[in-house]
């Protein structure tokens, strides 16, 4: 992996053979994800140096304004 590229949720999912949704939920400690899976996701994320991209989350969660 190039040193200037930040790891992604997709890379963590591929390494663990789980879905990106599972990785995302585990990173946010969602109750529907088991403890073992959550711990594995956090471990791999730490090993890869993963950091949550808060800007991407902001744009994803932003609701479009409704026009009158």
Image: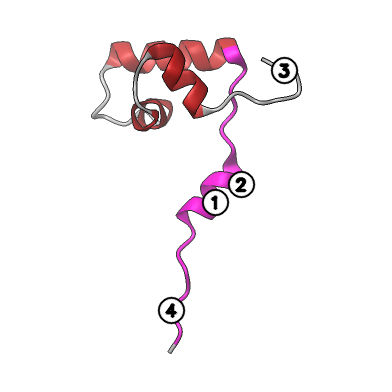
As helix, strand or loop, the secondary structure at mark 4 comes to loop
Instruction: Please tell me in which quadrant of the rendered image residue 4 appears.
Output: top right
In this picture, is 27 found above or below 36? below
Q: Which mark is residue 58?
A: 1
Q: Nearer the viewer, mark 3 or mark 4?
A: 3
In front: label 1 or label 3 = 3
Residue range in magenta is 48-67
Would residue 51 be counted in the magenta stretch? yes
Furthest residue in direction right, as rendered:
4
Residue at numbered disc 3? 2
Toward which corner of the image does residue 24 lie, by quadrant? top left
Residue that numbered label 2 is attached to: 55
- SS for dot 2: helix
At 52% from the left and 17% from the top, the residue drawn is 45
Q: Nearer the viewer, mark 2 or mark 3?
A: 3
Marks 2 & 3, CB-CB < 8 Å contact: no
Q: Quadrant of the C terminus?
A: bottom left
Distance from Cα at disc 4 to Cα at disc 2: 22 Å
What coloring was used for the rendering?
secondary structure
């Amino acid at each position: 992996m190039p040193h200037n590229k930040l790891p992604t949720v997709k890379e963590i999912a591929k390494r663990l053979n789980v879905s990106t949704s599972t990785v995302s939920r585990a990173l946010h400690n969602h109750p529907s994800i088991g403890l073992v899976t959550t711990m594995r996701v956090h471990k791999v994320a730490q090993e890869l140096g993963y950091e949550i991209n808060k800007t991407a989350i902001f744009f994803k969660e932003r609701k479009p304004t409704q026009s009158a």
